[in-house]
């Protein structure tokens, strides 16, 4: 609204009031608004009524020009399942799936950021390659950029002339406290409960990995406690593979002939203590008392 009126007040109007005024301005000026909503899952979690209202804005103007188009950017497409069917059908009419960044693409983006922000000859190619190797499985560019920034800050603190590989290793240890919060809040609750179950199993057995059979038992116990539906083995495996794609866990199959019992899950690059605190915080914000 401030685009149409620079003196428009920041307070005093409900969302519906703002939406009605926006429609009036678009009609009066014969404009079409393309609204791009990044991290759509976060908006859905906070207030799905807003998404519903935006998708219905054109319903009252069937015989006139459509004034609003929505592009939603979302990490986990299953987050849309929290919406009502009519809103879901509207948002799912056209879906474009983007592949995760490749190693070379991650390196190209890192190099372009360094070119405009860092003095020459401070970072060698091996540093870009090292960061890319750490994040390419998840394809999370935000994590890669944070690691680059943190590596440079560590080099500054140590009065180094160049960013060293050790700076990257130290930055990787810090990453969980920054990048993961945005990633975790975009993942739907059942998957986070499964991740929480993995943490519990790893803490109980004091090993670097947990058996999927034990994780399944823990997951089902938590679901029963929260009075949530129980999931099949195949559903749990699908969730585990999605968590693996995010780069949070690793899955290793020791024996393909024994279903689940010899499948091992590990968390190698993230502090279990920090991750558990973040999960508990997210559960609390969603009204899940675990």
Image (cartoon, rainbow, N blue to C red):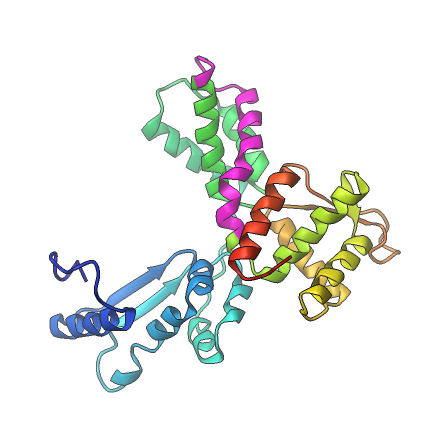
Q: Residue at x 39, y 74 (%)?
A: 52
Q: On the rendered structure, is 120 left or right of 267?
A: left
Q: Quadrant of the C terminus?
A: bottom right
**Measured along the vertical axis of the image, is residue 13 above or below residue 277?**
below
**Measured along the vertical axis of the image, is residue 72 above or below residue 105?**
below
> Can you give x and y, in whole percent of width and height, for residue 56 in the image?
34, 78
In the figure, residue 59 lies in which quadrant? bottom left
- Main SS of residues in magenta: helix
Q: On the rendered structure, is 199 left or right of 286?
A: right
**Measured along the vertical axis of the image, is residue 143 above or below residue 285?**
above
> Can you give x and y, in whole percent of width and height, for residue 262 in the image?
85, 50
> Can you give x and y, in whole percent of width and height, for residue 166 in the image?
57, 21
The residue nearer to you, when weighing 253 against 192, is 192
Q: Residue at x 47, y 14 (%)?
A: 158
Give the magenta-colored segment's residue range. Answer: 157-184
Q: On the rendered structure, is 167 left or right of 235?
A: left
The residue nearer to you, when weighing 31 against 236, is 236
């Amino acid at each position: 609204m401030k685009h149409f009126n620079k003196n428009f007040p920041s307070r005093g109007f409900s969302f519906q009031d703002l939406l009605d005024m926006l429609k009036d301005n678009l009609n009066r000026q014969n404009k079409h608004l393309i609204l791009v909503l990044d991290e759509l899952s976060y908006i859905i979690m906070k207030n799905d009524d807003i998404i519903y209202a935006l998708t219905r804005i054109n319903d009252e103007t069937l015989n006139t020009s459509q004034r609003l188009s929505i592009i939603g950017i979302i990490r986990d497409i299953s987050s849309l399942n929290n919406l009502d069917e009519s809103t879901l059908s509207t948002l799912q009419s056209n879906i474009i799936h983007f592949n995760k960044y490749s190693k070379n693409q991650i390196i190209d983006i890192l190099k372009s950021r360094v070119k405009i922000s860092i003095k020459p000859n401070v970072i060698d190619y091996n540093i870009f390659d090292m960061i890319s190797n750490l994040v390419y499985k998840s394809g999370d560019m935000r994590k890669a950029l944070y690691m680059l920034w943190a590596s440079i800050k560590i080099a500054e603190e140590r009065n180094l002339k160049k960013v060293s590989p050790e700076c990257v290793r130290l930055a990787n240890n810090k990453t969980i406290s920054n990048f993961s919060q945005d990633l975790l809040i975009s993942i739907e609750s059942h998957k986070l409960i499964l991740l929480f179950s993995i943490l519990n199993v790893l803490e109980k057995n004091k090993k670097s990995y947990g058996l999927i059979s034990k994780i399944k038992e823990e997951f089902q116990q938590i679901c029963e406690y929260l009075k949530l539906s129980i999931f099949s083995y195949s559903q749990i495996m699908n969730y585990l593979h999605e968590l693996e794609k995010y780069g949070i866990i690793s899955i290793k199959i020791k024996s393909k002939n024994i279903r689940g019992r010899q499948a091992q899950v590990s968390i190698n690059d993230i502090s279990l203590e920090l991750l558990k605190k973040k999960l508990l915080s997210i559960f609390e914000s969603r009204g899940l008392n675990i």
